[in-house]
Each structure stands twice: as C-alpha cells, then as structure tokens.
Image (spheres, grey):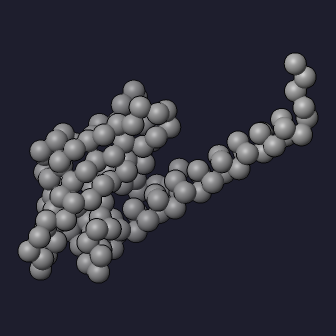
C-alpha cells in the first residue's frame, strides 16, 4: 500500500494545528483563572464531585458549590485543574471538603478554587 504524500502532509498539518490550538486554549484558561483568583471576591465552597477523565492530557474537573455574598441561592461551578502534575496524580480536594472560592461578583458562575490556580504560566 502506497501512502500518498498529500494526504500525509494534510494529516501532519492537522495534528500540528490541533496541538497549537490546544496550547492556546489551555493558556487562555489558565490566564482567566489567574485573573479571577487575583480580582475575585472570596467565599467558602464545598466540593460535590471530582472527575478525572480517562483520556491522557485531559484536565481533572472539580465540581463545587458556594453561595455568593448577597445571593440566596447556591451556585454550582466546575474548576478545571490546569496545574502541572507533580508525580503520578496531583492532589485534589476530596468530595465534601470545604474550599476557598474566588468568584467575579458580576458573574458568580465565573469562579475558581483558589488553591488550585497556579500563580505561574507554564
């Protein structure tokens, strides 16, 4: 079976473009989380679920809920843990544990778990 050069070039080009876009989206998510951690208001939250995707290279997700100041309802959010792994598995908060949350007052659904936001860009 002969591999045709144009299809091989198109496949490799697609892989390179996907890697570049993935890196840009990851960096944008990290910078947004850092901004929320710097400028956001503080609240106490509770972890309701932790999900580690089975796909290599995917970020674990921590689902949490908290009550923003001045609101009567609980807000449920998802935090993607974009920290570098230190060892086999990065330590994540357990389900039911209390966490410090930072959120944007104008949009409380834009929230992060403060201790899981890296202060450094990769």
Quadrant of the drawing holding the N terminus:
top right
> In the visual, does 106 lie left or right of 18?
left
Where residue 85 sits, quadrant-wise, is top left
Q: Nearer the viewer, residue 82 or 11?
A: 11
Q: Which residue lies furthest to the left in this view?
A: 72
Answer with the quarter of the image where residue 84 lies: top left
Whether residue 100 is visible here, answered yes or no, is no
Please say if 43 is above or below 1: below
Q: Nearer the viewer, residue 12 or 122?
A: 12
Residue 30: % across, % down: 46, 58
Reply above or below: 52 against 72: above
Q: How many marks?
A: 0
Residue at 49%, 32% (x, y): give it.
Answer: 56
Question: Which residue corresponds to the image point at 52% horizontal and 53% vertical from the top-left?
Answer: 26
Residue 75 horizontal/vertical position (percent)? 19, 65
Lateral position of residue 53 relative to residue 42, left or right: right
**Residue at image coords 77%, 39%:** 11
Judging depth in this view, the residue of 117 and 22 nearest the camera is 22
Answer with left or right where residue 116 lies relative to residue 74: right
Is residue 115 rendered to the left or right of residue 57?
left
Residue 44 visible within the image: yes
Residue located farthest toward the top when viewing the structure as drawn: 1
Residue 116 x/y as whole percent: 32, 50
């Amino acid at each position: 079976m002969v591999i045709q050069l144009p299809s091989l070039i198109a496949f490799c080009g697609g892989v390179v473009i996907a890697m570049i876009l993935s890196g840009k989206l990851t960096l944008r998510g990290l910078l947004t989380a850092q901004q929320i951690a710097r400028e956001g208001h503080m609240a106490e939250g509770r972890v309701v679920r932790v999900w580690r995707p089975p796909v290599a290279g995917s970020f674990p997700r921590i689902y949490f809920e908290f009550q923003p100041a001045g609101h009567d309802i609980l807000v449920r959010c998802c935090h993607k843990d974009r920290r570098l792994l230190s060892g086999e598995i990065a330590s994540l908060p357990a389900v039911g544990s209390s966490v410090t949350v930072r959120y944007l007052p104008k949009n409380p659904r834009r929230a992060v778990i403060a201790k899981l936001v890296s202060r450094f860009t990769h």
